[in-house]
Amino acid sequence: MMKSMTKKQKNLLLRIVAAAVLMVVFSLLPLEKYPVLRFVLFLVPYFTVGHDILRKAIKGIRNRQVFDENFLMAAATVGAMALGEYTEGVAVMLFYQIGELFQSYAVGKSRKNISELMDIRPDYANLETEDGVEEADPDDVEVGSIILIKPGERVPIDGVIVEGTSSIDTAALTGESLPRDVAAGEEILSGSINLSGLLRVQTTKEFEESTASRILDLVENAGTRKAKSEQFISKFARWYTPAVCYSALALAVLGPLVNMIFLHVPSSWDLWSDWIYRALTFLVISCPCAIVVSIPLTFFGGIGGAGSKGILIKGSNFMETLANVRTVVFDKTGTLTKGNFAVTKICPAVHDGQDGIADGAADRLLEYAALAESYSSHPISRSLKEAWQESLQKSGQKTANAQSPDLFAVRVGDTEEISGKGVITEVDGRRIGAGNLQLMQDLGVTITAENDHSDVEIGTIVHVCAGNEYLGHIVIADEIKPNAAEAIRDLRGSGVTKTVMLTGDAEAIASRVAKKLGIDEYHAGLLPGDKVTRLEQLLDETGSFAENAGSSKNVSSGKTASTGKNAATGKNVGSSKKGTLAFVGDGINDAPVLSRADIGIAMGALGSDAAIEAADVVLMDDDPMKIARAIRLARKCIRIVNENIWFAIGVKLACLLLGALGIANMWLAIFADVGVMVLCVLNAIRALV
Amino acid sequence: MKKTYKIEVDCANCANKMEEATKKTPGVKDAVVNFMALKMKVEFEDGADVDSVMQKVIENCKVVEDDCQIFLK
């Protein structure tokens, strides 16, 4: 523990120990007969431990800062000494300093913990120049430069791999512990660690704009957006201290007077000193620092801890909103689904109840479809080709052949694309049609009822026919993320009462995805603009900001400022009865919706600047499980904050009451004060884990 | 215009006092002190002379909390 202390802290610790030893020794000595000597002796530990407080108190008086905690402590202890309570005077100072030391140590420690957790700042880049490779400051590396990243080194700047293969550890960015394999042509983000091979990377961004710098910037600035509870506490501290001081004064003066006038107690030194002592006890409890420090400490720990798990929360205020989320609205594509098209089902035609899977009809169906679509670069065609290559790979044939354009050219004849319907082409001399139902009808191919699955399949259906023979159909769909359903269940488990899905896709697809994932409500066929309108209706229903419903014009402006009119646009509605609404999107095309929601969560958005800008919470990878995790982290953090607020204020008020009644003495007061702070700080540190 | 400064201060309440003092300084539109990150974000009013305003800010902060520092880089 000693090692991790600063010089200032070590110095203070030494003074505390020395003063404590002296105090104990002096109070054991039989000094009752020598009052002056006793006083002088006790001054030694008093000044040892408290000289800086006294000095600051004097400066405070000169600066007319009467309600400075240094002044309060000085007044309380000087008063105690004057009343002849030497041990108590020294002890109060001593414990106050112990509290200060503990607080400063805990704060320093958690600052260090966070910076270690977020230790993604690279120190140098190996820049390739004409004279060979040199170590350069990442700041000086221009976009488009070639840098070398050796095994074990941190990627300094975002870029694209030009040469080399390796696996990289992205744990610091995404919280994902499994290393990812990368090869030439792939994008690589700064902050990840190169584990195995040497990589040559062409930079695509400047250092300042690179992922690592942006993340650090976000986390460091998160504390500047203060939470309601933080503002409450600093306001509380502003009136608490003066209030307690004036009550102390009142207690010292009015206490004896009331006693004399109403109870006819004769004025005496004992009477006055008893009430002055009670007043001094007040002063000891008047220092607000214990409560004040624990709140930002909790948020800092919570935000830092979340950051190390791949969840970036852009401010303490969003922590509060997030903790209150009851409704989660999802964008479908890229959030619940992977956002890429893939063949999900191959259904060879069934003839007279006999399916042809046995004789390789599925393979042939896929082959024809892929060949028919071979000239198109449409996502659907691409997914068909990919699926075909995969199946060839499985059956052991060389993929190189399949990829070769020559092969396509040899086997595929004239191709005609019919817009909105599909493709008609010739493969191996046979006329092949691949497309939707309409195309099949146009070609005179009838699909029997047993082959028509159009009402049960999710996704786009490509029917294939050869000549007049119906071969079957292939289903291509945006794949649902494997853990999406679990993520929705998880959300329910963490207090979310309503889940909604918004999508531009057709009704049929939306309803099936929603059913499969267990989503309460969905809205299909929405254009990007409709999503904003729909979200506003949902906000209205949840009651998050009724006064502002319908004003969709002001979409993107209600974000940055927290003052004035913008405060009314629904951010920070933590106290709303029905809870807040979160929107989860992948940041593509949904920036306006992200900024409109009470809290916008962007997923896997590391690459997208617009999404990082518009969102309040950024999930660094695209794992939907992180949503519930983020909500739980926020809940925990807010719970700790509330515990600390009520515990600290409760204990302080109780001590004030007991002090006023003369039950609590100064010892109890200082123990309560320091004890509360220690407990609050220890509680706050839990947020980090 | 907004600028961020590194600061040095020991206690959380002192940081709050610095924030108050900075906000009250003429030429400052808004200020936020982040105790945990030891940073101060100052938004200046249009046309304010940053250097002289910051000198005044330091002075005001020293009044409320003697033991603080603002690093102007």
Image (spheres, rainbow, N blue to C red):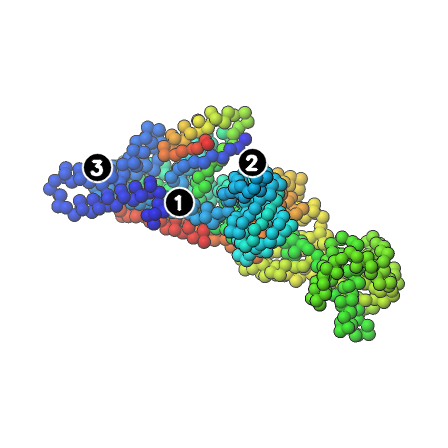
CB of mark 3 within 8 Å of CB of mark 2?
A: no
Judging from the image, mark 1 belongs to the subunit labelled A
Disc 3, SS = helix
Q: Distance between the Cα atoms at labels 3 and 2?
A: 52 Å
Left or right: residue A60 compared with residue A338:
left
Judging from the image, mark 3 belongs to the subunit labelled A
Q: Quadrant of the C terminus of chain A?
A: bottom left
Q: Distance between the Cα atoms at labels 3 and 1?
A: 36 Å
Disc 2 crowd, CA 10 A, few/some/many (<14, 14-19, 20+): few
From the image, state whether disc 2 or disc 1 is nearer to you.
Answer: 1
Mark number displayed over residue B4 = none
Residue name at image x 88 percent, y 63 percent: A444
Q: Across the whole image, how many numbered discs are drawn on residues?
A: 3
Relative depth, front residue between A185 and A81: A185
Residue name at image x 39 percent, y 48 percent: A681
Disc 1, SS = helix
Q: Can you give x and y, in whole percent of width and height, for residue A122 in the image?
A: 51, 44
Q: Can you give x and y, in whole percent of width and height, for residue A236 in the image?
A: 42, 41
Residue A48 figure quarter: top left
Would residue A268 be visible to someone looking at this image?
no
Q: Earlier in the sequence, mark 3 or mark 1?
A: 3
CB of mark 3 within 8 Å of CB of mark 1?
A: no
Q: Can you give x and y, in whole percent of width and height, for residue A393 in the image?
A: 70, 64
Residue name at image x 61 percent, y 44 percent: A202
Q: Earlier in the sequence, mark 2 or mark 1?
A: 1
Mark number displayed over residue A82 = 3
Which residue is label 1 attached to? A108
Relative depth, front residue between A332 and B4: B4
Disc 2, SS = helix
Residue type for callout 2: Gly
Q: Can you give x and y, in whole percent of width and height, for residue A295 in the image?
A: 43, 45
